[in-house]
Image: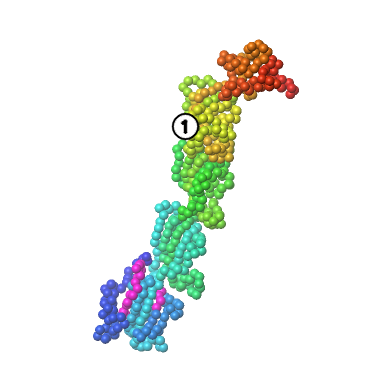
Amino acid sequence: MFPAVSHTLRRLPLLHWLLLLLQALERGLGRASPAGAPLEDVVIERYHIPRACPREVQMGDFVRYHYNGTFEDGKKFDSSYDRSTLAAIVVGVGRLITGMDRGLMGMCVNERRRLIVPPHLGYGSIGVAGLIPPDATLYFDVVLLDVWNKADTVQVSILLRPPHCLRMVQDSDFVRYHYNGTLLDGTAFDSSYSRDGTYDTYVGSGWLIKGMDQGLLGMCPGERRKIIIPPFLAYGEKGYGPISSPGTVIPSQASLVFHVLLIDVHNPKDTVQVETLELPLGCVRKAAAGDFMRYHYNGSLMDGTLFDSSYSRNHTYNTYVGQGYIIPGMDQGLQGACIGEHRRITVPPHLGYGENGTGDKIPGSAVLIFNVHIIDFHNPADPVQIETLSRPPETCNETTKPGDFIRYHYNCSLLDGTKLFSSVCCFPEICDSEGKRSHDYGDPQEATLGANKVIEGLDTGLQGMCVGERRQLIVPPHLAHGESGARGVPGSAVLLFEVELVSREDGLPTGYLFVWHQDPPTNLFEDMDLNKNGEVPLEEFSSFLKAQVNEGKGRLLPGQDPEKIIGDMFKNQDRNQDGKITAEELKLKSDEDQERVHEEL
């Protein structure tokens, strides 16, 4: 994983190493040559070689290793283990005895070797007073724990990269990441996972060791990296923490290995990022501040961890946009959206939940990603939107007005296409303003305009129509079923109607059940008293009114059962409720209204 060192520090020739190996095999371990002559060179036994060896010791490398030093009889003369301190030194520059310099060459981290060093490659005929006698052959058991060179750089290996990279780390970014930290030999010294929290910091601002600052650059959220940092870009000669400390300990001159998972990244200067994923055709209006919106969403952290979803509640999120009811990032990100649009909104922490986060699912300083589907939106000041789809070819002299009795077909749906009601197919029946059933399947809907029999927006949209005309109506909630909704209609839902006028009849004035087309008969009671006995029972009353309707002299209230209307009229005239009307009881409504005015005056 480390780069090749410069050609001036290339490793010893392969042929030379092969000759050394042959010499060791011929002489046997710890023995002289077959002729009994002393060893000419160091004997190397590689009794543990790790499977992976990304780097071998070369001349000029700095190494850290443990060793035990003994004589041929097994007596120990020195040990780094006894001092609890690794040997740390540059190899091949004369700082070690020649036998050790040669014996460490080509060694891998975690490799174990046994070295037999003849006197002339050790301490020679002089030895070390009180420690190593003259002409002593030395035996070393060595394990290499670290190797680096001043020419080394930070080594980055990408272990896993997500298919979509929303943002790469740059200098001055704020990052949240998990890591496991080990020494080069695999000894763990720290882990964010053990603290159950990410490491959160700025990059390139002096908060991190230089090697980590470099190793995080260009990283994507969700990416996993292995970052190897030489000591001079880490903690150098001082290391970190006392060696005897039970906590985090990084020895002097230690190379560091970090396995990093980047959770998210942002910059304090970031704004909300909006990406349109799907834009419906025919976007006439875009959401603006002050609109009331219904939308579905999935909310996740930058590494893909889901923290909330409206779909899981089977209910849209309903709120005003641009009014401070939601986090600032969503307030901004929802504006300009079209009904039916799918968009991705990326919200940096300072426009989300900040340094503290919220609850147990959104940590502090978290970037939030919302995948949003706009269901509908409206403004409390919106009127009914009316679009004429087709008109009959013939001239239309009369259009619908308040009081008219009409029959019409319709389809009703939400703005996202969800079908609700229809008079022409098998959707549930439309509901009146109270949410009750109002017709049978397949029959035209009947209504008297202006009589509060249908929702206000539909009543408005049906006025001014010609028979045979087709319209599209968009009805905002405050002119439909409001915040509470109705059976089959969500709260605060904008409704889309396609309507076709089937027929129209002039209605009657408010409070009237029957009107004359001309002036009523002068002798009304006599004409009504068919048997001339001075009394009019229900049968005579009914026969008379039906004859007037059949002859075109008057008409009953449309849209109601004629028998019921006539029965109600009879009860109104039968003042004493004795089952018959007399001349004194019979009064026209216009006369009754006039009398009432005089009484009030």
Q: Does residue 190 show up? A: yes
Q: Quadrant of the N terminus?
A: bottom left
Q: Which amino acid does label 1 sit on?
A: Cys
- The reply to whether the magenta stretch includes residue 56 is yes
Image height of 424 relative to 185, above or below: above
Question: Could you classify mark 1 by the number of other residues whose Cα lies within 10 Å: few (under 14), some (14-19), or many (20 or more)?
Answer: few
Image height of 541 relative to 59, above or below: above
Image height of 412 relative to 517, above or below: below
Residue 92 falls in image quadrant: bottom left
| Residue at which label 1 appears | 425
Q: Which of 350 and 473 is in front in this view?
A: 473
The mark tally for this picture is 1
- Which residue occupies the extreme left position in the image? 35
Q: Is residue 557 left or right of residue 202?
A: right
Q: Where is residue 346 in the image (x, y as percent from the top left)?
A: 49, 50
- Give the structural element (helix, strand or loop) at label 1: loop
Tell me what residue is drawn at x 67 percent, y 18 percent. Answer: 580
Q: Is residue 82 left or right of residue 56?
A: right
Q: Position of residue 151 (x, y in %)?
A: 39, 68
Q: Nearer the viewer, residue 179 or 10?
A: 179
Q: Where is residue 321 in the image (x, y as percent from the top left)?
A: 55, 44
Q: Position of residue 62 (x, y in %)?
A: 39, 73
Tell me what residue is drawn at x 26 percent, y 80 percent. Answer: 26
Q: Which of 97 and 594 is in front in this view?
A: 594
Q: In which quarter of the image is the C terminus?
A: top right
Tell me what residue is drawn at x 41 percent, y 88 percent. Answer: 130
Q: Does residue 126 show up? A: no
Residue 529 falls in image quadrant: top right
- The reply to whether the magenta stretch includes residue 523 is no
Q: What stretch is highlighted in magenta?
A: 42-67
Q: In this view, does 16 lie to the left or right of 112?
A: left
Tell me what residue is drawn at x 52 percent, y 36 percent. Answer: 495
